[in-house]
Image: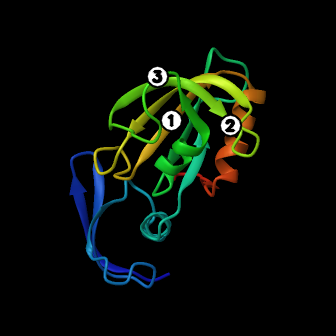
């Protein structure tokens, strides 16, 4: 992969002014790279700009009181619509930066997987700049794996390291 640009330091991060790239045609601008090699960072940004929705556990593997599955990308709110049933309120209306209590359900059978809290952060007011939802469930590998599998069944893909 070839990219042309100029680099420098901004606060604690590194930035590159991207002028051209085969992965990001017409997407010139400043991108924070945080010390990554330019080709690795450009690959991550290209995937994000091309509309991938990613999912990953946000907590360490093993037994714990709480386990978090984070979904980021254009399908994040659709995933919440398909997998989460609120205890109160109308379905499908997600206010940004709000927590909702309810159940995570299997997308095929509608069977309850776990009681959970859903956090909704709409882009661009999220860490990634994209729509993000977090399923905060009871900890433990069985519940987290079922939630993760359900999100994957909704069209997300597993996040790669660093995404």
Please report contact status of discs 1 and 2: CB closer than 8 Å, yes or no. Answer: no
- Is 53 located above or below residue 126 in the figure? below
Evaluate if marks 2 and 3 touch, with contact meaning CB atoms under 8 Å apart: no
Look at 69% across and 32% down and name the residue there: 144
Residue at the far top: name it: 65
Residue that numbered label 3 is attached to: 88
Q: Is residue 139 left or right of residue 10?
A: right
Q: Which mark is residue 114?
A: none
Question: Which of the two labelled residues, at mark 2 and mark 3, occupies the earlier sequence position?
Answer: 3
Q: Left of 130 or right of it: where is 9?
A: left
**Residue visible at 44% across and 85% down?**
22
Residue 78: x and y in percent read: 51, 50
Of the two numbered discs 2 and 3 in the rendering, the one whose residue sits closer to the viewer: 3
Residue 134 circle label: 1
Q: For numbered disc 2, what is the local secondary structure?
A: helix
Inter-mark Cα distance, 1 to 2:
11 Å
- From the top left corner, tell me how far across and down residue 4 is, in percent: 33, 82
| Residue 147 tag number | 2
Q: Residues within 10 Å of mark 2 (few under 14, many from 20)?
A: many
Q: Position of residue 35 (x, y in %)?
A: 40, 55
Q: Residues within 10 Å of mark 3 (few under 14, many from 20)?
A: few
State the CA–CA distance, disc 2 to disc 3.
Answer: 21 Å
Q: Residue at x 30, y 56 (%)?
A: 14
Q: Position of residue 36 (x, y in %)?
A: 44, 58
């Amino acid at each position: 992969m070839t990219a042309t640009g100029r680099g420098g330091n901004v606060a604690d991060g590194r930035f590159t002014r991207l002028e051209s790239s085969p992965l990001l045609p017409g997407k010139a601008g400043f991108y924070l790279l945080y010390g990554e090699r330019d080709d690795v960072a450009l690959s991550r940004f290209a995937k994000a700009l091309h509309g991938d929705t990613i999912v990953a556990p946000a907590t360490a593997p093993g037994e714990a009181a709480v386990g978090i599955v984070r979904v980021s990308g254009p399908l994040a709110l659709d995933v919440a619509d398909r997998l989460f049933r609120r205890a109160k309120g109308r379905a499908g209306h997600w206010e940004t930066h709000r927590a909702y209590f309810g159940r995570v359900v299997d997308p095929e059978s509608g069977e309850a997987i776990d009681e959970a809290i859903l956090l909704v952060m709409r882009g661009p007011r999220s860490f990634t700049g994209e729509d993000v939802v977090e399923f905060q469930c009871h900890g433990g590998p069985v519940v987290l794996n079922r939630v993760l599998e359900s999100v994957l069944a909704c069209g997300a893909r597993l996040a790669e390291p660093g995404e």
